[in-house]
Image (cartoon, helix red, strand yellow):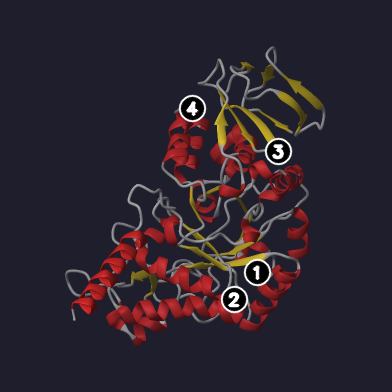
Amino acid sequence: MKAILRRLALASLMLLGAAANAAPDPYQPQPYVRFEHAEWSRNASIYQINTRQFTPEGTFRAAEKQLPRLKELGVDILWLMPIHPIGQQNRKGTLGSPYAVSDYRAVNPEFGTLEDFRHFVAAAHKLGLQVILDWVGNHTAWDSVLFKQHPEWYERDADGKPHPTPWYDWDDIIDLDYSKPALRRYMAESMLYWVRDVGVDGYRVDAAGLTPLDFWEHVSRELRKVKPVFMLAEWESRDLHANAFDASYAWTWWDGLKAIAEGKADASSLNTYYAWNEKFYPNQAYRMLYTTNHDKNAWEGTEFEIFGPAVDSAIVFSFISEGIPMMYNGQEAGNRKRLEFFERDPIAWQPSPYEALYRKLLALKKQNTALWNGQWGASMQQVQNAQPKQVFSFVRQNSKDKVFAVFNLSAKPVQACFKGVRHYGRYRDFSSGEAVSIGAESQLDMAPWSYRIFVQ
C-alpha cells in the first residue's frame, strides 16, 4: 500500500512539474498581434469605389469594365462603398446614404443584381484584384428588415424609442444593441455569407469603434477560418490590431498634414504622430494613409481644396511613409469637384498628369520592399536636418532596398542640410530617374511644398 501511495505522490509531483513547465513565463515577451495578414496584402494599396459615382451608369456591370484599367494602374484591394439596399424612411436626398442599410443580405437595385455583383467579384479575382465590402455594423435604416422583424435588437432612448447615434446628425439611421446575442449571431452570419458564398475578401468596417471590439475579434476569427481576408477599421486605435483588424485609419496623420498645409503647424508637429506610430503601435499594424476619401471629398473639400499647393507632396507622402496607401476613385483623373453624397453625380473622367504620378507611386510601392506594409516593410528612421520646422526627412531601409525621402512642408524655399550618415548612398531620383550620390556635402535646394524621393 505504501508503495502505491509513493507512486501516486510521485505521479502528482510530475504532473505539477509539467503544469509549471507549461505555464507561460511572465517575463517572456508575447506577440501583440495574434493573427497573420493575408500574404497578398504585404505590398498592397487600396482603391475606394463609390459605385454610384464611379461610372455614368453607376452599376456593377459598368464598374466591371474598368477593372482592367485599375489593374494596369497598379492597385490591389478594391473597397466598395456599401452595396446594400437603402432605407426610405427619413432618407436624405433623392437616393439616400449608402450607410443607411435596409437589408444586409441583399443588393441595392440601383447598382444591379446579386448576380451582377458576383460577376464583378469573379472578374476582379481573375485579374488578381481583391474586393472588400463596406460594412455598416453600428446602425441600420429606420425601415430595415431587422427593425421590422426584431425591434428588440435596437437601442432605446430614455423615452423607450429607437434613436440615431447620439450627438451626430445621422437622423436617417437608428443604432443597434450589441448586448443582444441573437443580433451578434445574425451579423456574424451575414458577414460570413458574403465571404463564403459570394467570394468577397474582407471588409472596411464603418465607425468600427462604435461596435464592441469583442464582436469584431470573434467575426474576424470566423472569417479567417474561411479564407485569408483583409479587415480595415474606420477608427484609430491600437487595440483593433491585436485580434481583429489588419488596418485602421491614420486620422491624426491626415489632420497633422492638413494643419501644416493651412499654416497652423510646422513640419516638426508630425514628430508626435511618428513617435506614437513607432512606440505605441505594433509593427504589424497597417495604418491607412490617404489625401481624400468619400467623407473628406463630400463634406470638407477635395484634396486640392484641403492641401492647396501642398497636395502633390501630401500624395507622395501617403505612399512613401509607413502605412498602407489608399486612393479615392477619380484622384487619378485629378477630380476637382465634391461628389454629391445623396444624388447621382458621376466623376468627370479625363486625362490627367496625376494618373502618371499614381502609376509611378503604385509601382514603387509594389517593387521596393522597404515600402511594403507592416512587418513586411522597413520602419521609418528619422534623418535629422538643419531646418526641422520646414523639412521632414527620413529613410526606410532593409537588407535589400532603401528610400531616402525629403519634404519641404512650408511655403518658403529652403536649402535642406542633413546630419549624420544614415541617408548616404547612391540613388535614383524618383521624379527624374537620374543617378544621384548623396554624402556629407549634399544639400538640396527645394521649392515651397516640394519633395525629393531617392530610391536605392
Mark 2 vs mark 4, foreground winner is 4
Decide which of 406, 345 is in the foreground and name it: 406
First of labels 2, 1 by sequence position: 1
Tell me what residue is drawn at x 43 percent, y 76 percent.
Answer: 188
**Which residue is under mark 3?**
401
Mark 1 vs mark 3, foreground winner is 3
Tell me what residue is drawn at x 65 percent, y 79 percent.
Answer: 118
Mark 1 touching mark 3, by CB under 8 A?
no
**Which residue is under mark 4?**
263
Q: Secondary structure at mark 2?
A: loop
Amino acid type at image mark 2: Glu
Horizontal arrangement in the rendering, residue 328 relative to residue 286 (left or right): right
Please identify the quarter of the rendering in which residue 307 is found: top right
**Which residue is under mark 1?**
58
**Which residue is under mark 2?**
110
Mark 2 → mark 1, Cα distance in angstroms? 8 Å
